[in-house]
Image: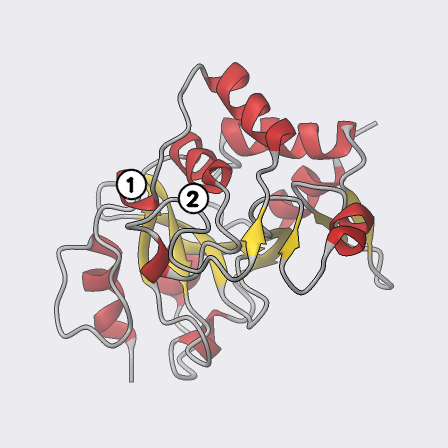
């Protein structure tokens, strides 16, 4: 049986892109572990932790499950809203949304830079998170970032600290199964803090940045 998450993403990818091998491995792990739901439209949404168990563990002070993120093939359809209404073909050829990183609407996208390198970028909602930069230079580093165990990866103010240190009023317990999968599959260590992966955590409010995605998208904003 074909992997539905992979098939959904392939259908919306710009023709210049292919689904990264690491992302295929993750989507297979998600399906093998039944970490998904199909919505009323039949579209599949993937998770890193059983959704039902996460919700049942949630109290006023803590929850299980590590970083919350939803993998869904957003594609290029709604990029124009992030870029102030501009429906630009170059944008659609260089960006493809593949995950929701925050409950307030922030997203992660695959981005082809000027050197034709595929990177993972963050597109903050603006109504909550304003993080807008390269999150990871490759899928392995993106998974390492997710495995650290922040509540969500859309809040860059947490990146200088280990999970739960910047806000110890609500404790997020780590997703051990996902951490072990990342370590064994890619032969890597899990970082202590987000800044070990996110090099230049630029935001929409910044006037300038060393981040390459920040400097690329400025010319399209209105």
Residue 185 placed where, x, y %? Answer: 53, 17
**Colour convention:** secondary structure
On the rendered image, what quadrant is the N terminus found in? top right
Question: Callout 2: helix, strand or loop?
Answer: loop
Q: Nearer the viewer, mark 1 or mark 2?
A: 1
Location of residue 113 with respect to 89 vertically, above or below: above
Q: Residue at x 55, y 70 (%)?
A: 105
Residue 171, placed above or below residue 20: below
Label at residue 116: 1
Location of residue 6 in the rendering, given as x and y in whole percent from the top left corner = 66, 38
Q: Element type at marker 1?
A: loop
Q: Are marks 1 and 2 in contact (CB under 8 Å)?
A: yes
Q: Residues within 10 Å of mark 2 (few under 14, many from 20)?
A: few
- Residue 82 in which image quadrant: bottom left
What residue does disc 2 label?
A: 16
The residue nearer to you, when weighing 83 against 193, is 193
The residue at the point 35 percent across, 62 percent down is 90
In the drawing, does residue 7 fall left or right of residue 131? Answer: right
Is residue 80 placed above or below 133 in the rendered structure? Answer: below
- Estimate how packed mark 1 is, as few (under 14), some (14 to 19) or many (20 or more) residues with alpha carbons within 10 Å: few
Residue drawn 38% across the image and 63% down it:
91
Label 1 – label 2 distance at C-alpha: 9 Å
């Amino acid at each position: 049986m074909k992997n539905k998450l992979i098939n959904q993403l392939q259908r919306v990818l710009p023709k210049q892109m292919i689904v990264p091998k690491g992302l295929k491995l993750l989507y297979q792990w998600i399906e093998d572990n039944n970490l998904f739901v199909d919505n009323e439209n039949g579209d599949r949404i993937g998770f890193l932790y059983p959704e039902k168990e996460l919700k049942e563990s949630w109290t006023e002070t803590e929850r299980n499950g590590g970083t919350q993120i939803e993998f869904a093939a957003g594609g290029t359809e709604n990029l124009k809203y992030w870029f102030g209404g501009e429906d630009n073909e170059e944008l659609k050829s260089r960006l493809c949304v593949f995950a929701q990183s925050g409950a307030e609407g922030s997203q992660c996208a695959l981005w082809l830079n000027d050197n034709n390198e595929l990177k993972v970028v963050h597109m903050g909602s603006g109504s909550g998170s304003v993080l807008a930069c390269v999150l990871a230079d490759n899928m392995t580093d993106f998974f390492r970032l997710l495995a650290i165990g922040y509540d969500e990866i859309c809040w860059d103010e947490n990146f200088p600290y280990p999970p739960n240190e910047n806000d110890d009023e609500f404790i997020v317990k780590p997703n051990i199964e996902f951490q072990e999968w990342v370590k064994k599959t890619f032969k890597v260590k899990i970082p202590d803090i987000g800044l070990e992966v996110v090099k230049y955590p630029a935001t929409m409010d910044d006037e300038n940045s060393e981040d390459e995605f920040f400097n690329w998208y400025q010319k399209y904003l209105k």
